[in-house]
Amino acid sequence: MHFVSVIGSADSTLQSIDWIETRQPTSMAAPSNNNKELPMPACFHNPVTTVFGGGSLDQIARHCPGKVALVTFPEAEQLGLVARVRSLLGERLVCVIDNVQPNPDVAWLRGVHEAFWAQHGDCDTVLALGGGSAIDTAKALIVGTASGHFDELLELLASGKPFSPARHKTLVAAPTTAGTGSEVTPWATLWDAGQQKKYSLHLSCTWPSVALIDPELMLSVPAGVTVSTGLDALSHALESIWNHNANPLSDTFALSAIDDILDCLPRLQQDLGNRELRARMALAALKAGLAFSNTKTALAHSISYEMTLRHGLPHGIACSFTLPLVLGLAWGRDAGRDQILQKAFGRDLAAAQQRLRAFLHQLGVRTEFADYGVTAAEAQAMIDAAMQGARGRNFIGAQAA
């Protein structure tokens, strides 16, 4: 087993985690009468160098090599973030894309992507500063095509076959919300509202090389976004548990994240300027991101895509309002997974579901499909279809459904 981890102030780094166990450990102790089987060999891998703590953004100069393009959200200029990045990078900042919108749509991405590669093809690094949409946009931008046309990338994604990009940039991610997890995962979701579908981007180059997680950047996030992104993190943690791809280390990250989010998020909603709570949520979101970086998401996220495309729900709400329901579908499917879920919620399923519902209701989130204009028949059809989706098939209850 090899596990390297350093977490601390902005001067410390959570280095690349590469956890591989290839054989059962040999013990020199006397034989035991305990015949319980040892866990099967498992692998945990995350290549992202992660800097955590207040002031982490100040380290961008050392982590962003060469010429840098900044991808950020419209309010970043008013908040002083663009000027701050410019002061840190100087003349190396050659491009600023600051009109990122929620749920980046291919109709908008097409022009931005092609202009970026035509005008800044010699750029070395893309710095994503923002929430999940900014980081997902940056992941799309760093993947270049041979023709220079964005539709070539969409065709490759639509094929579903593995491919190596013709060219790519280095990605550094600095999240301004606590929840996306995109800063420590390779996945990006690209939306096509016109065709009512989405594309999932996942390449070795879309892993950020560095994640700079600075809780100070999150102090200005309003209550609604704080709740939505925090619930996205909770969903990431739970989805990594009721998942065929779960492993002991992903479980450890997930359980710690769940405990922190359940305790912290309602208090943070009422005290948005609390630095301690912001830091705790930032760390919880990081742990949830590390958990699902190895497992991918599952049924709740598979359902969420339809709810976002057809009903306009923000992603964090769309992937969390079904958590009590999905918990019930997961419970009893796998004894090992039940043990992990019971560490978080206790041994009584009804009480566990009620705890989750009460938590969501406290945050102002409704938990029934009918609350969002979806009939019972439509909801069942949506669940059935989600079970067959790429993320739904990760769910431990998918085969039995």
Image (cartoon, rainbow, N blue to C red):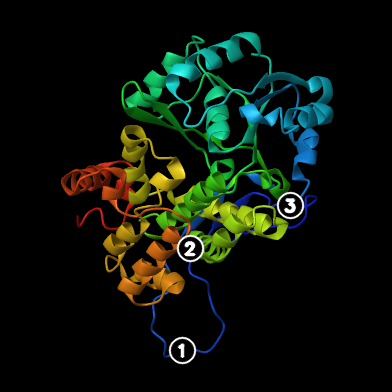
- In this rendering, the answer to whether 310 lies above or below 22 is above
Report the residue marked by disc 1: 32
Question: Residue 298: horizontal and vertical position, in percent?
Answer: 36, 50
Q: Residue at x 52, y 26 (%)?
A: 140
Let me know if residue 160 appears in the view: no
Seen from this angle, which residue lies furthest left?
377
Q: Secondary structure at mark 3?
A: loop
Query: Are the residues at dot 3 and dot 1 in contact (C-beta closer than 8 Å)?
Result: no
Q: In which quadrant is the N terminus drawn?
A: bottom right
Query: Are the residues at dot 2 and dot 1 in contact (C-beta closer than 8 Å)?
Result: no
Which mark sits nearer the N-terminus, 2 or 1? 1
Residue type for callout 1: Ser
Residue type for callout 2: Asp
| Quarter of the figure with residue 332 | bottom left
Residue type for callout 3: Gly
- Categorize mark 3 by other alpha carbons within 10 Å: few (<14), some (14-19), many (20+): many
Comparing labels 3 and 1, the label whose residue is closer to the camera: 3
Question: Residue 329: horizontal and vertical position, in percent?
Answer: 27, 60
| Quarter of the figure with residue 390 | top left
Which mark sits nearer the N-terminus, 3 or 1? 1
User: Where residue 53 is drawn, which disc sits there?
Assistant: 3
Q: For this view, does 188 lie left or right of residue 173? A: left
Q: In which quadrant is the C terminus drawn?
A: bottom left
- Categorize mark 1 by other alpha carbons within 10 Å: few (<14), some (14-19), many (20+): few
Report the residue marked by disc 2: 251
Q: For this view, does 44 lie left or right of residue 245? A: right
Q: Secondary structure at mark 1?
A: loop
Q: Secondary structure at mark 2?
A: helix
